[in-house]
Image: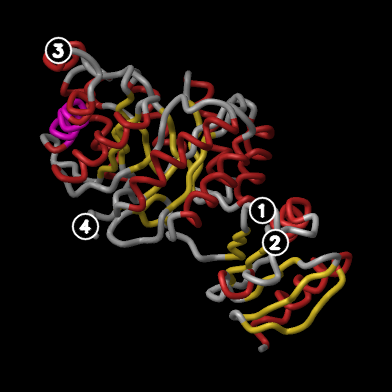
Amino acid sequence: MKQTKQIDVGGVKIGGGAKIAVQSMTNTDTRDVKATLRQIADLNDAGCHIVRCAVPDAEAAEALRAICRESPLPVVADIHFDYRLALAAIESGVHKIRLNPGNIGGADRVHEVVRAAKERGIPIRIGVNSGSVERHILEKHGGPTPDAMVESALYHVKLLNDCNFDDICLSMKSSSVPDTMRAYLLAHEKTDYPLHLGVTEAGTEYMGTVKSAAGIGGLLALGVGDTIRVSLTDDPVREIHAAYSILKAVGRNDDGVNVVSCPTCGRTRIDLIRIAKEVEQRCASVTGKRLKVAVMGCAVNGPGEAREADLGIAGGDGEGLLFRKGEILRKVPQAQLVDALMEEIAKFNEA
């Protein structure tokens, strides 16, 4: 796995072999400090590591002062076009800036932002979307292709490098999963900067999660990416839940309980779908353990197929088997099966 450079966002390390950081963005009006802090608290409770806030005007930039002071999470200022907002956000105490330096004016303005970021030790994320690629690059490539997005990102990198600034993170997002993946793979080949993964405009919870799982998960499985944000048209807390599910699916997070279950078949004689959902729901609140738990529909094949699971249940006819590491512990009536499993999970580390 390629080792990228490392940046520090308010104490959260990104890149350089650090654990994948999960990010989200508030959808409150940043000028409403109380509402924004409430949402940040919810994101923190869900496991978010870094939060981004929109900065549309000077009032929002000033509101960041109170938000940064009270936030349990490092705060990133999302800046577009106006370098004065970047300067104001830095003055308010943000921990990172999301900014494309080529979009804020001349070299003197870039120098001002870089000088302020250096003084505070604040990294900058260059965030290129398929809709923000410069016109001359679009004309060269015939549209917002993966090559065009990466060329745009490297153009902005050079502007910062010319100011002797290298505390940089990159993102190249598209609503197209294949284009997003190709762009990140190309950037991974060309640079050593940490990569912020995401599929932009991914959609509502269902389709947005599917597209993010395909794009973000696919890249992570290939060893590409250092921090992620799942973008959903929904409550930002749902982005965190989706992000952790993706990390678990590709083996990049083993915290908590990883529930696996079979798809059911004609041999199933218990209400496996309901049971699997209940186990998943109840295991979501389990902390301080790293377990793989299997929910299988067939008592004949279940323990064998799921022998790598730490604990599991396998259905029979009105009852089921409770097993550990493929070894049967005992039979349990269906009505008591989930409770018995949760009891074993609770005491597993004592075994």
Looking at the picture, tell me which residue is in the foreground, 207 or 135. Answer: 207
Residue picked out by circle 3: 136
Residue picked out by circle 2: 297
Of label 1 and label 4, which has the lower sequence position? 4
Q: CA distance from mark 1 to mark 4?
A: 42 Å
Our reading of the magenta stretch's main secondary structure is: helix
Residue picked out by circle 1: 265
Mark 1, other Cα within 10 Å: few <14 / some 14–19 / many ≥20: few
Q: Quadrant of the N terminus?
A: bottom left
Above or below, 59 relative to 239? above
Q: CA distance from mark 2 to mark 4?
A: 41 Å
Q: CA distance from mark 2 to mark 1?
A: 8 Å
Q: Which residues are magenta?
A: 151-160
Instruction: Say if mark 3 contacts mark 1, CB within 8 Å.
Output: no
| Res. 254 mark | none
Of label 2 and label 1, which has the lower sequence position? 1
Q: What coloring was used for the rendering?
A: secondary structure
Indicate which label's residue lies in the foreground, 1 or 4. Answer: 1
Q: Quadrant of the C terminus?
A: bottom right
Of label 3 and label 1, which has the lower sequence position? 3
Q: CA distance from mark 3 to mark 1?
A: 56 Å
Indicate which label's residue lies in the foreground, 3 or 2. Answer: 2
Of label 3 and label 2, which has the lower sequence position? 3
Q: Quadrant of residue 111?
A: top left
